[in-house]
Image (spheres, grey):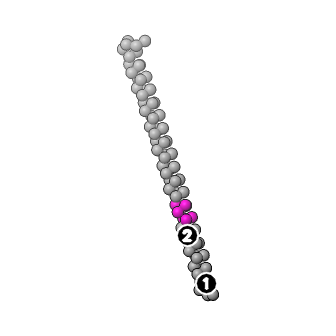
Amino acid sequence: MASKGLQDLKQQVQGAAQEAVTAAGASAQQVVDQATEAGQKAMDQVAKTTQETIDKTANQASETFSGFGKKLGFMK
């Protein structure tokens, strides 16, 4: 009888340990997913900001050259 009780206790402990490992793995995966998502958002923001800067710089260059062309009489 005592060995049956110990066997049941062993199975309960093993089951609890397996559940803890599974929960820890799920939590770790959530952390990885959140970090990946945050990294992707950061990269998206960098790309957006870079594109906006390129667009602004191109527009400024275009306006500057247009102004030079008008001053030199090439453009009206």
State whether residue 76 is above or below residue 36: above
Compare residues 12 and 43 and report the one nearer the observer.
12
Q: Is residue 42 magenta?
A: no
On screen, residue 71 versus residue 29, left or right, reads left
Q: Which residues are magenta?
A: 22-28
Image mark for residue 18: 2
- Give amino acid for label 2: Gln
Residue 51 image position (x, y, % from top left): 45, 35
Find the residue positioned furthest to the bottom: 2
Q: Is residue 50 above or below residue 59?
A: below
Helix, strand, or loop for circle 2?
helix
| As drawn, 8 above or below 48 | below
Q: Which residue is mark 1?
A: 4
Can you say whether 47 is above or below 30 in the image? above
Foreground of the two, 65 or 44: 44
Q: Residues within 10 Å of mark 1 (few under 14, many from 20)?
A: few
Amino acid carrying label 1: it is Lys
| Residue 51 - label | none
Q: Residue at x 58, y 68 (%)?
A: 19
Q: Position of residue 41 (x, y in %)?
A: 51, 45
**Residue displayed at 40% across by 26% down:** 61
Q: Residue 42 versus residue 29: which sits nearer the camera?
A: 29
Residue placed at 49% from the left, 42% from the top? 45
Which sits earlier in the primary sequence, circle 1 or circle 2?
A: 1
* The quadrant where residue 55 appears: top left
Judged from the image, the secondary structure of the residue bearing numbered disc 1 is: helix
Question: In which quadrant of the rendered view does residue 74 lie?
Answer: top left
Residue 1 picture location, percent across and down: 63, 87
Please give the name of the residue rendered at 55% of the width and 65% of the height, measured from the top-left corner.
22
